[in-house]
Image (cartoon, helix red, strand yellow):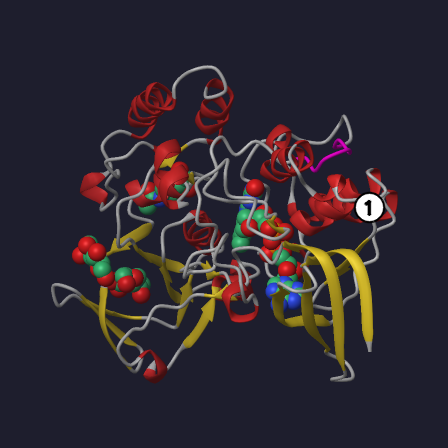
Amino acid sequence: MEEQTVVLIVGAGPAGLATAACLTQLSIPYLIVEREDCSASLWRNRAYDRLKLHLAKEFCELPHMSYPADAPAYIPKDQFVKYLDNYIERFDIRPKCQTAIESCSYDEGRKCWFSVARDMTTSVVVRYTAKFLVVASGENSAENIPVITALHGFAGEAIHSSRYKSGASYSGKNVLVVGCGNSGMEIAYDLASHGANTSIVIRSPVHVVTKEIIRLGMTLVQHVPVNVVDGLLVRLSNFVFGDLSKHGIVRPKLGPLLLEAKTGRSAVIDVGTISLIKNGTIKVLGNISKIEGNTVEFEGRKESTFDAIVFATGYKSTANTWLKNGESMLNDDGLPKQEFPNHWKGANGLYCAWLVLPSMPRISPVASCLATMHKHDGPDKMN
Ligand SMILES: Cc1cc2nc3c(=O)[nH]c(=O)nc-3n(C[C@H](O)[C@H](O)[C@H](O)COP(=O)(O)OP(=O)(O)OC[C@H]3O[C@@H](n4cnc5c(N)ncnc54)[C@H](O)[C@@H]3O)c2cc1C
Ligand SMILES: *[C@@H]1O[C@H](CO)[C@@H](O)[C@H](O)[C@H]1NC(C)=O
Ligand SMILES: *[C@@H]1O[C@H](CO)[C@@H](O)[C@H](O)[C@H]1NC(C)=O
Ligand SMILES: *[C@@H]1O[C@H](CO)[C@@H](O)[C@H](O)[C@H]1NC(C)=O
């Protein structure tokens, strides 16, 4: 079976949906394919219960549709999913679900992208030909779990954060959270609030801020140089939290906004974890050196026993496994080669749209990405 279209969008997360809506507004024909059985599967199936958008709503709106006026500043997960469902209905987006792209390559002769996809229900192969290819498969495509000696020998339950829902079932248990990004810090808080004896492994420097501080920073950076804003954010955060180094939390040398722009590592927005770390409710531990049965050994020979480990160690892009001829746009990790705002365009009609990028400022990156795409010689110019 072979289908032809003008634009093929790979992935029906928020970024793919936003791309679809923008193309609809411009009357450009497209097809959108999604490997899972629903759109926005990350938000529907792979996010914990208490999750809210980390950024204030004005920074997380998709193009052409606002949140309801009475929506809270920080949108809870379920409300975000409802917003996406309304968005899908408003723009009549019909993702072809359970269709996983297995390869895309550019044909120089015919000047178009050939894609091979598999229908996950029937295993039938479907082929697509498109003039333009939009990679919207995101940077959260696969779980990233570090290689740790004898993790497989761990006698307790080990899960990735994408499968964690709530601390309710961990009450009274000894739980170790590995990773101190937004997910790890919030999951540790959730576990402790549900009465789990909670410890967290913090392996590298991290910026901790409040949501108000980051909101201020994202607003200011539109008018003030980023290093000046960063300096202010660090001073405000130090004022709020004090020196956290004695609790094992050290600030990176680069400021929070620059660090994110350069490395993609975002600041942690505290949800209450820090005060629990300060008063010893949540214990901070260093790198894991060994796991044996239920016992985990940390560098410096300290050891403790745990019933469960939650790996909040992030995700990987999988775009490189299927995208051939993508060198113009993606690096070896399947992430955009160029820093924001030049990340979105590759050669031969190849585009990248995803919501969270090492972008700065992160104001509706999809919207700005698409706005740029349309201003320049994007899909709209081709008919
Ligand atoms: C716990 C958590 C909290 C977050 N909170 C925020 C937040 O508050 N604010 C914020 O801005 N960002 C947040 N993020 C970042 C997150 O990446 C984005 O919010 C958002 O979901 C990214 O949208 P996306 O469309 O780029 O990618 P995704 O939502 O990951 O969507 C990509 C889609 O592509 C599909 N896909 C992948 N490969 C293929 C293939 N080969 N064939 C077909 N389909 C494929 C996937 O199944 C997926 O549905 C959070 C992330 C996590 C994990
Ligand atoms: C933990 O290990 C990483 C590399 O695996 C290293 O960069 C880091 O400094 C270590 N952290 C501590 C606290 O020892
Ligand atoms: C630590 O602080 C939290 C919230 O501030 C409080 O609920 C808890 O009882 C405190 N625990 C200890 C051991 O002081
Ligand atoms: C709680 O966890 C810490 C750190 O792992 C451990 O030292 C302590 O013994 C645990 N407390 C209980 C009551 O199990």
Q: Report the residue that reaches farthest toward the top.
A: 223
Please report the bounds of the magenta region as a residue range. Answer: 61-67
Which residue is denoted by mark 1 in the rendering?
28
Give the class, few, some or many, for how many residues have Cα within 10 Å of label 1's Cα (few <14, many ≥20).
some
- Residue 92 covered by magenta stretch: no
Residue 72: image location, x then y, percent? 67, 31
Q: Residue at x 75, y 31 (%)?
A: 66
| Residue 249 sits in quarter | top left
Q: Quadrant of the N terminus?
A: bottom right
Q: Residue at x 63, y 32 (%)?
A: 57
* Image-quarter location of ligand 1: bottom right
Q: Main secondary structure of the magenta part?
A: loop
Mark 1, secondary structure of its residue: loop
How far from the left and from the top, in percent, is residue 131? 72, 56
Q: Residue furthest left?
A: 300
Query: 243 and 251: which one is in front?
Result: 251
Q: Residue at x 66, y 33 (%)?
A: 371
| Residue at 67% in and 31% down | 375
In x, y percent, where is residue 310?
42, 65
| Closer to us: 238 or 216 | 216
Residue 62 belongs to the span the image colors magenta: yes
